[in-house]
Image: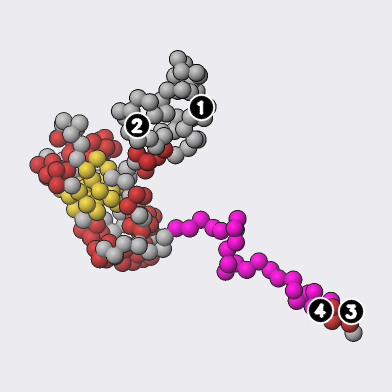
Amino acid sequence: GKAKKRKRANHSCRMGFDKGVQSVGKAKTRFRKAPKTENVYIKLLVKLYRFLARRTESKFNSVVLKRLFMSRTNRPPVSIAKLAKEMTGKANKVAVVVGTITNDVRLLDDTKLKLTVCCLRATDTARARIVAAGGEVITFDQLALRAPTGSNCVLLRGALKAREVYKHFGRAPGVPHSSTKPYTRNSTKSRKFESARGRRGSCGYKV
């Protein structure tokens, strides 16, 4: 009797891994299933592309939907210079950017901007230069009517790590073989903050 009861109790205490509660080390990669923004236009686009991703077998629509969920830091801007470079020889295709298109004063040849561009937003100068070159800027609902499956579309995105903050990430500033930018009072103009001893051969040592 007692031995059997003890055995039964031990058996009932043996529990499996509860997949509902993700413990440390067991957590899966998280990604958004919906946008956090309260912007009604983004929400309407999500509704549209959720439908298209479900009802078409197009990978394009799934990627656009996923990018609509992203935070603004994960939707880096694309300059018109990058746009012109990436769309060379693709004049009959639509450039698609789930983000902002910005101006670039270094681009001198505006004839390269005779493109059809689809984006969430374009700065006033960028839009004016594209339109003046004979191109057009369209919205995602217009794109859904023209190319429901994303045919003849080139999906582009900006450089994620172009933000200044990424210069401060990595090995600690000052340790050997580190090129990480330190947070100083005025790192561009200052002479004496983290730039003397240890940073030049004439002051002790240099790493």
Label 1 sits on what residue type?
His
Instruction: Indicate left or right for 129 with 25 as reference.
Output: left
- Label located before the other in sequence (3 or 1): 3
Give the image location of residue 37, x and y in percent: 31, 62
Kindly report which numbered mark, 3 or 1, lies closer to the viewer in this rendering.
Answer: 1
**Magenta residues, start to end:** 7-31
Q: Is residue 149 magenta?
A: no
User: What is the spatial separation of the Cα atoms under label 2 and label 1, in whole angstroms?
Assistant: 19 Å
Which disc is residue 177 wearing?
1
* Residue topped by disc 4: 8
Q: Main secondary structure of the magenta part?
A: loop
Residue occupying image coordinates x 33% and y 66%: 51
* Residue topped by disc 3: 3
Is the Cβ of the residue at disc 2 closer than 8 Å to that at disc 1?
Answer: no
Label 1: element kind: loop
Label 2: element kind: loop
- Label located before the other in sequence (2 or 1): 1
Label 3 sits on what residue type?
Ala
Label 4 sits on what residue type?
Arg
Kindly report which numbered mark, 2 or 4, lies closer to the viewer in this rendering.
Answer: 2
